[in-house]
Amino acid sequence: MKTKKLLPLVLCSAVLLSIGGCKSNSPLTQNTVLPVATSVEEQLYRPNFHFTPKKGWMNDPNGMFYANGYYHLFYQYYPDGNKWGPMHWGHAISKDLIKWEEQPIAIYPDNDKYIFSGSAVVDTHNTSGFGVGNKAPIVAIYTLHDMTKEKENKIDVEQQDIAYSNDNGFTWQKFEQGNPVVKNPGIRDFRDPKVTWDEAHKQWIMVLAAQDRSQFYKSKDLKNWEYASDFGKNIGAHGGVWECPDFFQIKVRGSNETKWVLIQSLNPGGANGGSGTQYFIGDFDGTTFTLDSNFAKRVAQEKAVWIDYGKDNYAGVTWNNIPNADGRRLFIGWMSNWEYAQQVPTNAWRSSTTIAREIQLIKKGDNFSLISNPVKEINEYISKTIKGKSLKGEGKLSMLKAGKIDLTQAIIEFNLKNLKQDTYTFTLSNAVGEFLTFGLNNSDHYLFLDRSKSGKTDFSDKFVGSFTKATLEGNQLEGAFKIILDKTSIEIFYNNGEKVITEIFFSNQPFTSISASSNEGIEISNLVINQLDTNKNQ
Ligand code: FRU
């Protein structure tokens, strides 16, 4: 029977793993009283410009939308512990996707009924009827997860509920009289609704994760939902339970052709172990999502196509209601991995988000792919630049000497020239002999990242494991790197975002220099190292 076969997978899903590695402990017993952050922890590990809650546990980004000059970010939040626990929706706002201001908690759980991941839409035409006066209501759609039912091993643990806001997303009322808006149909893992407006068919579309597939529902009013279709049972990566989908229409860059993109996280089974996020490109007729035929071939060949090949970009989804005049598709992920997120060496808070990214759809020949790049707003914070350097030589070349630029808030860009069948290694290092390497293996055509000597690693044996690898298809010869560095994270955007690697690390002192090496000599052009000052504009 289907459900029986899936049960072991289901029992080890992110949620249960996160509350104690498939043990039966209650999440509450796992959490200690939150220690106050020491200034050492603050100084060494509180990111300079990636969002972290001031205290407590955070996982997935939720319910992102733009309204009235603010980007809203909600997130899975447990304020009273530094491990996963009773889920709330935390809240932060930003005017530029870089500097975030934490807000009061947006949605609270009712005792054992936790508020899991979901989305929010600006209901411009008041289809829901929640609006007051002329003001568009904001409607949040999320999974209500019943812990009592979970402990009783019931199947119908998860259902989709809604809440609404009449003050642009700052305070929320649960739709008590109408919830659930989607009942559990007999599927144990049935969660993380992402709702989007489908202009072509004048309807709301909800995609949610249903164990080993994505499911689509449709609605005219956000309250009454009709099942539409399934996608993905035997397609793509299936090493773990599917979670946190996203679904949107996007134009091919530089053309008027549009496609639909399905983003689908899963845990475990990611590109380099643990949590990961794959995507699919195709068409949508208002009911069914059909994979583009060339993309289907790629999925079959590569097993899965990932939005990020690093270990630390999970459950990422995109903002709703970005104005047409802007037109970007903006994405943010949770910068951690369920394999070790609850053990990372911070105490007062745990986890941060990735840098916000612009996602674009590109087409080469008949092949579509997504590229991701840091949002351009980050450039507003550049406070110092070392520029225009070309380097050529053998052995180890210094790209930046200690002290010239603060590498805990920096953007590094460069191009590798005249690539040979060689391995190009870049090393970030500090004064206490710790280092992190990344680079390009141009014989076997892959990017790599190795954090095994980067500082604290022994809090989990999963944190190091094997080094991270991202296989390159085709045009690897461009050798263009853009790297965003914060105190505990590196985000590598290769060839204008065609391949991305995001990973966290916990060095005992900040990395201060970077060097390059290869066997047969190395040539670097257009080296630009920017320092960021995120206290600017305060
Ligand atoms: C993904 C996830 C979601 C769920 C949430 C619970 O990380 O497991 O599927 O809604 O976390 O916090």
Image: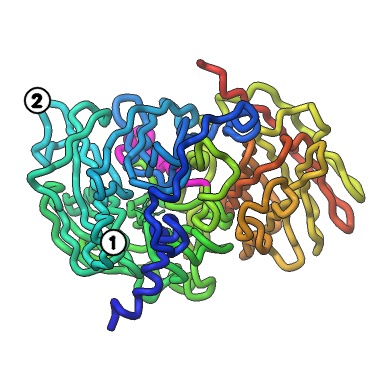
Relative to 227, is 299 on the left or the right?
right
Given residues 413 and 221, the one toward you in this image is 221
Q: Is residue 303 above or below residue 415?
A: below
Q: Secondary structure at mark 2?
A: loop
Q: Is the stretch drawn in magenta largely helix, strand or loop?
A: loop
Tag 2: amino acid: Gly
- The residue under the point 78% across, 53% down is 425
Would you name the residue on which mark 1 appears? 150
In the image, is residue 183 part of the stretch drawn in magenta?
no
| Image mark for residue 133 | 2
Q: Are marks 2 and 1 in contact (CB under 8 Å)?
A: no
Q: Secondary structure at mark 1?
A: helix
Q: Is residue 281 above or below residue 320?
A: below
Q: Which residues are magenta?
A: 320-335
- The residue under the point 75% across, 62% down is 442
Tag 1: amino acid: Glu
Give neighbour class at mark 1: few <14, some 14-19, many 20+ (Cα, 10 Å).
some
| Tag in front: 2 or 1 | 1
- The residue under the point 52% across, 54% down is 337
